[in-house]
Each structure stands twice: as structure tokens, then as C-alpha cells.
Image (cartoon, rainbow, N blue to C red):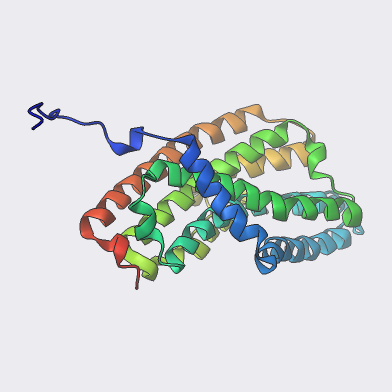
Amino acid sequence: MDTRSKPLFSPPVYRSVSPARTGAMVQRYLYLLVGSWPRLLELVYWPTVQMLMWGFLSLYLSGQSGFFAEIGAVFIGSVLLWDILFRGQLGFSISFMEEMWSRNMGHLMMTPLRPLEFAAALMVMSMVRLAIGLVPVTIMAIAFFGFNLWGLGLVLVAFFVNLFLTSWAIGLFVSGLILRFGLGAESLAWSLAFLLLPLACVYYPVDVLPGWLQWISLSLAPTYVFEGMRALLIDGVVRIDLMVWALLLNVVYFSLGLFAFLRFFDAARDAGSLLQLGE
């Protein structure tokens, strides 16, 4: 008989993170994605439709005189950057929802897989899914409209990092809600990001908003990314200060999103809702 006493405090399971388990989950999602052509088609379909719609509008505006002739590229840039944010969050959430739809969440959580490893795999898949959808669309933007997103240079890295962090923060929070409250909260996975569309000033500058709403807009990290994009395309100025503000806000929001995901996961496990995946 083992008479050794157990430690009074054992570290949380979240601290034990295995890259191998994260990689195994990524491999699982890649098999699902590559083995389903409808999934691959869907990744390209909507970004293409949206880019073509706004691209032809930008061509019309470029044929006008004055200010409208200058903002055609801004529309396409806004569409592509918004797709990074929205598709990044959607890629995270859909990979998570596939576990819910297949009623596999309870099985996963009975394995050694840790919540942090699960979240890390979802983040990787959001980047993979976005790359599959975004790269062909950016090439079409060059071919059809002469807009080269990759020509923005190193500042594009700052745009990508900040938009991904925002998308992951939203994805973590929404996934936690669905874990805790079931598929009745599923609609948030598709709709919550659209709350940022008017507030983050994707297609217009912040000063268009009423004064009281500008404070809300400036508390959102994506606002600084889109303001930085307009400064670059219209004025030719790289606003490093805006990227720093966006990064600082994203650190806060991502930390809150991760904290909420882990707390909701604990609450779902305590309530037994991991095995009750209905409405």
C-alpha cells in the first residue's frame, strides 16, 4: 500500500501543454478539410463574391472625378482586411462547432487533451482555413482590379497579427458560451463578429461616428487597423502608433477571451453539459 501523502495543491491541468496533442488535433481537422471538397469550396466562395462586388464598385468609383476616384482601393482593402477578421473568427468557430455537431466534445475531453491544446489547435486551423480562402481571392484582386494586398509591405504583418488576435478573442469567447449553454448559443458564432462591422469603422473613418460612439469605437482594436490601412492607402503614411494601440488592446481582449473560455469550460464540466450538447 502506498502511504505517501498526496500534495495539498496540484497545478491546474492547463499548465500541462503538449505540442504533440495540439498537432494531432490540427491533423484531424486537416483530414476533415482536405477530404471534403464542399468545405474547401465554401472557404473560397463567399470571399470571392464579396471581393467581386466591392471590386466592381471600386471600378465605378475610380471612373468618377475628385475624392471618389481615390478611394476605390480603400474599399477593396477594407473588404480583404475585414475578411481576415471575420474568416479568422469563423475558421476558429467552425472547427469548434464540428466537434459539437458530431457530438464528439465529451469524447475529446475524456482523452489527455487539455483545453489550452484544444484552443491552440483551433487557432492554427483558423489560419489554415483563412489562407485557403484568402490567397486565391487576393490573387483575383490583382488580376481583376490591380489591387495588390501583399504590396502593402511589412505593415501587412501588423494588420494580420492584430486582426487574428481579435478574431481568436471572439472565437474563444463564443466557443466558451456554446460549451456552457449548448447549441442554443450557436448563432453567436455567425453573428457576433458583425457587431464590430459598424463600430470598427471598416469602410469609413472614426470621425463619421457621433462623439459618444467614437469612444466605443476607439476601445476596439480593429478600429486602429482600419484607420492605419486608410492612412497608408490614402496618405501614404505608416501609422506605427495605431498598430501599437491595436496590439495593446488585443493583448487585453485575447487574455479576457482565453480566461472566459477556460472558465466556461470548467463550468460546463462541473455542470455536466459537455455530455449534453442539445439546445
Total number of numbered discs in the rendering: 0
Name of the residue lying farthest toward the front? 1
- Side (left or right) of 179 relative to 165: left
Q: Residue at 69% across / 62% down in the picture?
A: 40
- Give the image quarter of residue 41: bottom right
* Location of residue 257 in the rendering, given as x and y in whole percent from the top left corner: 41, 45
| Residue 220 in sight in this render | no
Rendered image quadrant of residue 141? bottom right
Q: Which residue is located at x 72 percent, y 42 percent?
A: 230
Res 278 seen here: yes
- Residue at the spot 37% in from the left edge and 43% down from the top edge: 114
Q: Position of residue 53 (x, y in %)?
A: 78, 66
Q: Quick one: 278 or 24, which is closer to the camera?
A: 24
Q: Which is more toward the observer, 71 or 111? A: 111
- The C terminus, quarter of image: bottom left
Residue at (28%, 62%) from the top-left corner? Answer: 273
- Farthest bottom residue in view: 279
Q: Is residue 211 above or below residue 152?
A: below
* Vertical comparison of 102 with 1: above or below: below
Where residue 76 sits in the image (x, y, percent)?
A: 77, 53
Q: Quadrant of the N terminus?
A: top left
- The one nearer the camera, 1 or 186, is 1
Up the image or down, 17 lies above or below 192; here it is above
Residue 3 place in picture, x, y as percent: 7, 28
